[in-house]
């Protein structure tokens, strides 16, 4: 693999490891203070990635919410909000989704080779569709993002994407926020699925920060030698 961005994976989950409930209204796993922290981290990154399932189910806007942070980015010669990125095997994405319609910023769709032509036709001018191999090759995606100038990538879900990044050993830093309740339903999506992870009983992940934020707690882990002590705390980088 060529050079890749610094990768920060950010996730909120219940005490028992779930990202959401099994259906109905979206489950809020955090609070206003932590949402603001996440917004600060977003503002410090060059791109934000979610999986296609998250685009379909959650319809996220993936924008920097704070006007002050947007203005700060513009003053530094950046777009008000980071580039938006998703990955898909089949390309079943709706161009009217907020991912594509919200924000004057580039949208990149990394797509499995077999579905590239159909996805380009479906999305038209809503996004740039990039051939990511068959099946999608995350190392290839990371190299392409780096070539496009992305130096800091924030990965925000969902569970399948978390699993693929973590099992591939691509994550440099993990932000895990624990909500003070249980979901208790095995039908609900989990933080990660089954896989061979680099960290286990004989190789423990390095916990570098524990922070209480109202009624939730942030656990911050260094997962690679590239870990930047102050880079993931939310302060916008210079450059």
Image (cartoon, rainbow, N blue to C red):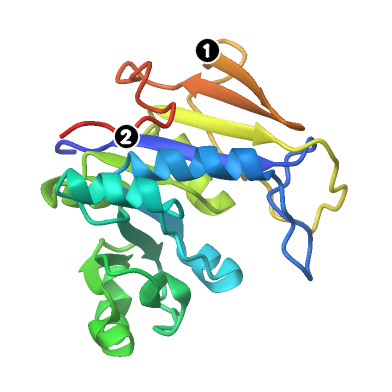
**Front-lying residue, 47 or 21:** 47
Q: Is residue 147 left or right of residue 87?
A: left
Q: Pointers 2 and 1 in contact (CB under 8 A)?
A: no
Q: Compared with residue 17, is residue 189 higher up or lower down, i.e. above or below? A: below
Q: State how many labels appear.
A: 2
Disc marking residue 195: none
Image coords of residue 16 (percent x, y) = 79, 38
Label 2 environment density (alpha carbons within 10 Å; few <14, some 14–19, many ≥20): some
Q: Nearer the viewer, mark 2 or mark 1?
A: 2
Residue 112 in sight from this viewpoint: yes
Image coords of residue 162 (percent x, y) = 51, 44
Question: Residue placed at 51% from the left, 21% from the top?
Answer: 221
Q: Is residue 3 left or right of residue 50?
A: left
**Which image quadrant is residue 232 in?**
top left
Label 1 environment density (alpha carbons within 10 Å; few <14, some 14–19, many ≥20): few
Q: Compared with residue 228, is residue 96 higher up or lower down, i.e. above or below? A: below
**Which image quadrant is residue 207 in?**
top right
Residue indicated by mark 1? 203
Disc marking residue 236: 2
Image coords of residue 166 (percent x, y) = 47, 36
How far is the residue under mark 2 from the one under mark 1? 31 Å
**Front-lying residue, 104 or 69:** 69
**Front-lying residue, 228 or 137:** 228
**Front-lying residue, 58 or 223:** 58
Q: Compared with residue 230, is residue 143 higher up or lower down, i.e. above or below? A: below
Which is nearer the N-term, disc 2 or disc 1?
1
Question: Residue placed at 44% from the left, 59% from the top?
Answer: 62
At mark 2, the secondary structure is loop
Question: Residue placed at 46% from the left, 38% from the top?
Answer: 9
Instruction: Pick the quarter of the image with the C terminus.
Output: top left
Q: Residue furthest top?
A: 202
């Amino acid at each position: 693999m060529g050079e890749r961005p610094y990768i920060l994976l950010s996730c909120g989950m219940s005490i028992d490891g779930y990202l959401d409930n099994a259906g109905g209204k979206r489950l809020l796993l955090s609070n206003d203070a932590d949402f603001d922290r996440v917004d600060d981290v977003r503002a410090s990154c060059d791109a934000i990635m979610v999986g296609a399932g998250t685009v379909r189910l959650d319809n996220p806007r993936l924008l920097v919410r704070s006007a002050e942070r947007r203005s700060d980015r513009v003053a530094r010669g950046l777009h008000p909000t980071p580039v938006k990125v998703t990955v898909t095997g089949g390309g079943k994405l709706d161009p009217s989704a907020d991912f594509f319609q919200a924000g004057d910023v580039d949208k990149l769709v990394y797509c499995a080779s077999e579905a590239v032509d159909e996805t380009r036709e479906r999305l038209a001018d809503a996004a740039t569709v990039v051939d990511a191999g068959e099946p999608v090759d995350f190392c290839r995606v990371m190299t392409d993002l780096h070539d496009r100038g992305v130096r800091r990538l924030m990965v925000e879900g969902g569970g399948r994407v978390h699993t693929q990044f973590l099992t591939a050993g691509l994550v440099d830093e993990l932000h895990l926020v624990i909500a003070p309740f249980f979901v208790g339903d095995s039908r609900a999506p989990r933080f990660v699925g089954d896989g061979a992870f680099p960290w286990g009983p004989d190789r423990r992940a390095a916990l570098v920060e524990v922070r209480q934020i109202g009624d939730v707690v942030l656990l911050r882990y260094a997962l690679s030698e590239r870990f930047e002590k102050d880079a993931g705390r939310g302060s916008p980088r210079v450059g």
